[in-house]
Amino acid sequence: MKELVKRKIDHYFLISLVIGIILRIISLLSIYRIPDVYLYFDGAIDLINFDYNSFRPPGFSIIIIPFIILTGNGPLSAKLASFSLSIILIVYSYFIFTKASLKLFEKNKTNEIKAKYIGLIVSILISLNIYFIFNSGKGLREELISVLIIMIFYYTIVKEDMNLKTNISLTLSVSFLTLTHLTVGIFISFGIILFNLVSKLKYFKIKFKSSIKTIIIFFSFLISFVFWGVFSVYKFGEFFYNFHIQNEWFKQWFDFDLSSVENLINIFKNAIIFGIPLEIIFLIILIGFVFMILFFYILFRNIKSKQIFYIFIVLGINFAYLSIFLASRGRFFIPRSPGTEPSPRLIIYFFPFIFYIGAYPLGNIIVESIINNINSKKINYLMIFYFITYSVHGLQFFLINNSLLQFFLISWSIIIFLINDLPLLIFLIKYRNSEYYLINI
């Protein structure tokens, strides 16, 4: 019986994967390209010619090279790279978060099913998320960053053995992330090091077999960062040329100036007033109000769990940092030029971890209903309804620049809450038994 259920879950995953691929093909064929695509494509051409001239690190451009060879079409090759990585992200999420979930349960057949359901829910939420779908057709690097962050989580927290293969995989993941997006590499590495230090406090009682992985992460990041800095000195005459260019760009478009203490204070103040609220708004629009409440509830109820505390520290550090940039873009009602408006692109690569924590009680409840034969069909129908309505969460986000649609946006948000968030809220209240929400620490 339980083996049959496990096979069914794999079938459900394949169905969700096919749906996700179809939606991404539509995106690939219909979504416009943005100027960043040409920078990545030009970087790929430079790599082929052994003459790299971009101020941006080459990670994503390296991924584009096979698609240039296959198609001979530069912009299309970037879109195909992003499209392929978005599919890999769905697949990786299913298997990695299934394995991560197994660490949260005592090992038995029932809990293996629960873990597979949690992995399934995460992969479905990624597959159907409207922003991931739209973004995958633009030819951008967010999908690659998301895959790499999940891989680092897997090799750092889930796969605890210290064999050579694991250590090499962790090293390559951190190095490639850093050479894809320098600041993400910095703050992911810093977050993991901080997690390792804080978790040694008696309050958490988190045990590590060894601190070698943290050392590997630190030196993998450091060597990659220094390598890029030395290249920048050779090519552009400045070690921090990448940051210099970005700072000038933000100063021009967003009044983002780091030249004085007063400006720094204003930047941090704006991050608190505008940036953090804007992050929360994006999360609610693209994921759902009730799901975000569930995420924070599980997060703080289980903060002593090794995985949960890792996610809390790493996401917290990155969201705090990224709120600075969203604040410079946001200021809510201040008009902005095209391309400078607030965008969740900066935070979407952390969505899978939010899905993972929120999926924990949902997987618990579904499996318990199947095993005990209690309303299992009703729960399945409710979850199918939830996923269908979830897939249009954030549709209004893509119309937000059209002032004629403001009334529609407000009405749409209310409708989405009623047809998607409210049933989920009722579902969670009905199955509010604490054993579904507490992780075995």
Image (cartoon, rainbow, N blue to C red):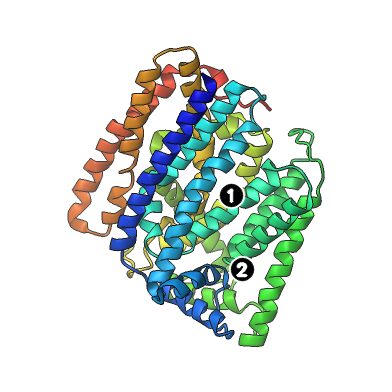
Q: Give percent across and percent down for residue 401.
A: 27, 59
Please, what secondary structure does the residue beneath circle 2 have?
loop
Name the residue located 57 percent from the left edge and 57 percent from the top edge.
321
- Outermost residue toward the left in this view: 404
Q: Nearer the viewer, residue 248 or 10?
A: 10
Residue holding disc 2? 179
Q: Give percent across and percent down for residue 333.
A: 32, 58
User: Which picture quadrant has residue 29?
Assistant: bottom left
Q: Nearer the viewer, residue 142 or 270?
A: 142
Q: Residues within 10 Å of mark 2 (few under 14, many from 20)?
A: many
Q: Nearer the viewer, residue 205 or 12?
A: 12
Name the residue located 29 percent from the left edge and 49 percent from the top edge.
395
Rendered-image quadrant of the C terminus: top right
User: Which picture quadrant has residue 12?
Assistant: top left
Q: Is residue 212 left or right of residue 125?
A: right
Return the mark for residue 150.
Answer: 1
Type of the residue with mark 1: Ile
Above or below, 283 against 372 in this view is below
Name the residue located 39 percent from the left edge and 76 percent from the top edge.
73
Please, what secondary structure does the residue beneath circle 1 have?
helix
Q: Give percent across and percent down for residue 90.
A: 47, 47
Q: Nearer the viewer, residue 357 or 385?
A: 385
Sequence-wise, the earlier of marks 1 and 2 is: 1
Q: Is residue 433 left or right of residue 76?
A: right
- Residue 359 visible in rendering: yes
Q: Could you give the CA–CA distance between mark 1 and mark 2, rounded to whole angstroms?
A: 16 Å
Q: Residues within 10 Å of mark 1 (few under 14, many from 20)?
A: many
Type of the residue with mark 2: Leu
- Residue 270 visible in rendering: no
